[in-house]
Every structure is written in C-alpha cells, then in structure tokens.
C-alpha cells in the first residue's frame, strides 16, 4: 500500500487487508495506545446522544450527519480493537470497554439538558473541531510511525475520516444562525477543550485497556500516571509537522489565519509545551516534512 493512498468515506471493516498483519512489526507501546484509542472511539454513541440533544431542532440533515459521524467513530473503535486483538489475543475489546464505560461518566452525558456544555452550538462546534484536529493529527502520526501494514492502513483510513469530521464541524459552525462569538470566547472554548485532553477520558481508557481486570486491586487507577503514559507514547510519534497542522486547523476554527504569524507562534509554543510535558528536553527535532 502506497503511503499516499487516499481513503474515501464509507469504508467498512471488510475493506481492510487484515491478511497483511505482521505480528513482528507490532510496537508494544503503540499497541498500548491503540487499545486505549479503541475504547475512546467505541464510546461514540454517548457523544451522539449528547450532540442530538444539543442539535435537537436543527433539522433532519444535521441529525443525519451526527448519526453518520457517530457510526464512523464507532467503526474506528471496532477497527482498532480488532487490530489490537490480533496483536494481543489476551485483549478483549468488549470487556475492556465495559470497564471503561462503567467508570467514565462525564456529567454532560448523564444529564438531559439541550444546552451545550460549551455554552452554545458555535462553542460546541469549536470544541469538536479541536477534537477532530487532534485525532486527525494523531492518526496521521500513527500511520507515518508504524511499520505494521494493517495498522498503517487503519490509521490512514481513520485519519482521513477525522479530517472530514473536522470539515463537517467547521461547516456546521459557519452555518449556525446564532450570533458570532467574540474572539476571546472562541479562544477560551478551544483552549478549554485542549486542556481537557488531561481529563479522565484518555487516561482511564489507557488504564482499562492495559491493566487486566484481575490486576485492578494490585494496580489501582492513577490518573496522573496513565495520563503521562498516554502522552509519552504519543510524543514518540509526533513530529513538528503534525503539531503545525493541528495548530493550523484549530486556528482556522477560532478565526485566526492558519498561515499567519499568530498560528506559527502558537504551533511553536504547543510543540515546546508537549515536549516538556513528555519530559523531552533539548532542541525540538524538525523533520524534512516539517
Ligand atoms: Fe475517530
Ligand atoms: Fe472524528
């Protein structure tokens, strides 16, 4: 499979070349991260329920787009879970997911309010754009960083979906009849969602995916520890150009010129901050593609 393959929307698990799987090329730390990512992706139906509430009167087209988005995210979870089960037959996606779901219940999933936790639909769309920018960049880094052919293909397919999701939410943001948000508010929503990457969702998914149920008593959940593990694994793969792209996508969603000076500075700051958090020192590595 050429690296430049363009993956279209609407693929299914049957389209993946599972027969190309090569266990000798599985990186154990990437496997840890893919198990955790599978759980987060697989949890999409709760987000669909929440987004359907927020957009309850937005019309059938918007609701159908939310359903389609959720189906694609769930499929990401299934694809990653199936790959992780091939790489580690002791991993059980459904069992790990049941533990994750039992322990991770953000307040906005539990209530029945129609209002977005971001204050408005525009705010909600900015937060979704931040998430899709992050996932699009993340799976691109997996695609480029793995030697395992099936994971390379899955990550390529998912990265393409995530980029389309970003565009969907950006278009939805721009179509809202609600008044435009002031710049500072857009920035606060975006920064708020970025810092939430520290929240329980990813760290707890990492724990449930990688600590077997029968070891829970010996190895209790430690948010800080598993958040660090997630972050350190991700930073092994991120290169400067991934973070630049991520920052440009977020900049566009908040109304900053993605090619301009502010976006450039934000990208450099973010790269430095991410490396510091991962305990990486020294000059940030540039790549030829950066
Ligand atoms: Fe996804
Ligand atoms: Fe997505």
Image: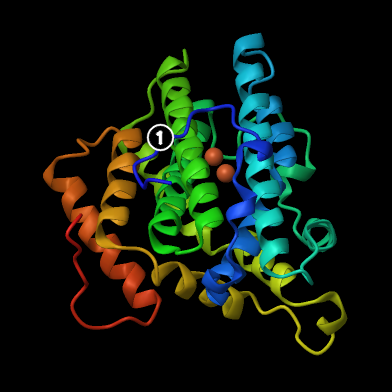
**Which quadrant holds residue 220?**
bottom right
In the rendered image, the vertical position of residue 146 relative to residue 162, given as above or below? below
Measured as percent of width and height from the top left, residue 280 is found at 32, 81
Colouring scheme applied when the structure was drawn: rainbow
- The image quadrant in which ligand 1 is located: top right
Res. 121 in view = yes
Quarter of the C terminus within the rendering: bottom left
Residue drawn where x is 50% and y is 32% of the image:
165
Question: Farthest residue in the right direction?
Answer: 214
In the rendered image, the vertical position of residue 46 relative to residue 36, given as above or below? above
In the rendered image, the vertical position of residue 259 relative to residue 233, given as above or below? above
Left or right: 97 as drawn, with respect to 195: right
* Ligand 2 neighbours mark 1 (CB distance < 8 Å): no
Residue drawn where x is 64% and y is 25% of the image:
68
Determine crowd level at label 1: few under 14, some 14-19, many 20+ residues with C-alpha closer than 10 A: few
As helix, strand or loop, the secondary structure at mark 1 comes to loop
Q: Nearer the viewer, residue 153 or 115?
A: 153
Say which residue label 1 marks.
6
Measured as percent of width and height from the top left, residue 38 is found at 66, 55
Res. 41 in view = no
Measured as percent of width and height from the top left, residue 236 is found at 40, 72
Measured as percent of width and height from the top left, residue 235 is found at 40, 70
Q: Nearer the viewer, residue 75 or 58?
A: 75
Residue drawn where x is 63% and y is 35% of the image:
72
Residue drawn where x is 70% and y is 55% of the image:
81
Q: How many tags in the picture?
A: 1
């Amino acid at each position: 499979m050429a690296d430049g393959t363009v993956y279209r929307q609407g693929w299914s698990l049957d389209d993946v070349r599972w027969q190309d799987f090569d266990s000798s090329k599985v990186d154990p730390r990437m496997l840890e991260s893919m198990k955790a990512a599978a759980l987060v992706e697989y949890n999409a139906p709760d987000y669909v329920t929440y987004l359907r509430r927020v957009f309850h009167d937005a019309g059938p087209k918007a609701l159908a787009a939310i359903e389609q988005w959720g189906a694609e995210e769930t499929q990401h979870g299934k694809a990653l879970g199936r790959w992780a089960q091939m790489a580690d037959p002791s991993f059980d996606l459904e069992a790990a997911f049941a533990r994750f779901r039992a322990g991770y219940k953000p307040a906005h999933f539990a209530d029945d309010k129609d209002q977005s936790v971001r204050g408005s639909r525009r705010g909600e769309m900015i937060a979704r754009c931040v998430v899709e920018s992050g996932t699009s960049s993340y799976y691109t880094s997996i695609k480029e960083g793995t030697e395992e052919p099936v994971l390379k293909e899955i990550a390529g397919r998912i990265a393409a979906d995530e980029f389309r999701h970003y565009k969907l939410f950006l278009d939805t943001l721009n179509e809202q009849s609600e008044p435009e948000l002031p710049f500072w508010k857009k920035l606060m929503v975006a920064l708020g969602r970025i810092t939430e990457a520290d929240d329980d969702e990813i760290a707890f998914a990492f724990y449930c995916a990688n600590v077997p149920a029968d070891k829970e008593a010996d190895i209790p959940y430690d948010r800080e520890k598993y958040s660090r593990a997630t972050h350190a694994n991700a930073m092994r793969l991120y290169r400067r150009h991934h973070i630049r792209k991520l920052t440009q996508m977020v900049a566009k969603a908040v109304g900053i010129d993605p090619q301009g000076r502010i976006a450039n500075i934000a990208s450099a700051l973010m790269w430095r901050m991410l490396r510091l958090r991962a305990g990486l020192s020294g000059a940030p590595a540039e790549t030829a593609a950066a």
